[in-house]
Image (cartoon, helix red, strand yellow):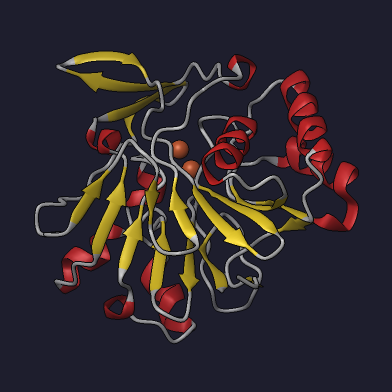
Amino acid sequence: MKITVIVDNYVSKRDFLAEHGFSVLIETEEEKILFDTGQGYALKHNLELIGTNLSSINKVILSHGHDDHTGGLRFFNEEGIFPEIIAHPDIRFPKFKVSEMGKRNIGLKIDLSDFDKKTFSKEPLNVDKYIVFSGEIPKENRWELGETQYFREEDGVLKKDPFADDASLYVKTKKGLLVLTGCAHSGIINIVNYGMKITGERRLYGILGGMHLKNASERRIEKTVETLYDSKPEFVTISHCTGFNAGVRIREAFGEKAIFTGVGDVFKFDL
Ligand SMILES: [Fe+2]
Ligand SMILES: [Fe+2]
């Protein structure tokens, strides 16, 4: 299996474009799966640079409704290419961020009606023999939650976003479980624990994706890194929304097993 970082906040190679967002291309012998699509500026350009076009993508799996993960769907609409979409049903709620910049709509802004094949699931779903879509992730560690700026609109009322739609992919590799995250709004430890539970895998091989620890307390960062360290993964990436503070801490703890990702990076895994 080959995974290429297509959208990230950083670039690793010349000619690629970065933006605030995340997307990876997963290539197996059978298919090409896009996990997230970025914000909607860089996706097509970066895919073309690696010689991939939108029409060769069989499935688009969305980690959640935020526009820095769903915005790139616009390229599919524009070109009239409609791969299967897999996501949690709650991605469709209007979502807002309330901060010093005011109230901003950061939800799904793409019309999904032309995508005929859509699978919305709260339950875990086998994407193929090796890849499992998490569905809804139980938020068992309450200490991993506590975001105050994120809301969703239910029947015209703004409510604290429970991040029900935050989903991950679990890949069963030869060396253990590979966890792919979008923003990890459910909390990275909750995500890893749920993956172990539903796949029955006891070895954590690696984590690739954002951890959304940019504004997290030192205490939460410390506890997260310590708990991850105890799980003995072979690598942990610092990507998208993990943030500088958590990134430094991850590097300190994991040394060379901490990998700072950017657009154009390629990972290969034995299944
Ligand atoms: Fe994000
Ligand atoms: Fe997000």
Which percent across, then down, holds residue 265?
63, 70
Q: Nearer the viewer, residue 165 or 17?
A: 165
Please report the residue visible at 44 percent of the width from the left and 87 percent of the height from the top. 51
Q: Is residue 227 left or right of residue 15?
A: right
Q: Is residue 203 left or right of residue 197?
A: right
Which percent across, then down, holds residue 214?
64, 33
Q: Is residue 102 left or right of residue 226?
A: left
Q: Is residue 58 above or below residue 106?
A: below
Q: Is residue 102 above or below residue 194?
A: above
Please report the residue visible at 60 percent of the width from the left and 70 percent of the height from the top. 271
Please report the residue visible at 35 percent of the width from the left and 38 percent of the height from the top. 123
Instruction: Check the image and name the residue furthest to the bottom.
Output: 51
Q: Is residue 170 above or below residue 213?
A: below
Q: Tell me the quarter of the image containing the N terminus.
A: bottom right
Q: Is residue 122 above or below residue 72?
A: above
Which percent across, then down, holds residue 232?
82, 45
Which percent across, then down, holds residue 47?
43, 76
Q: On the rendering, which quadrant does ligand 2 occupy?
A: top left
Please report the residue visible at 23 percent of the width from the left and 37 percent of the height from the top. 92
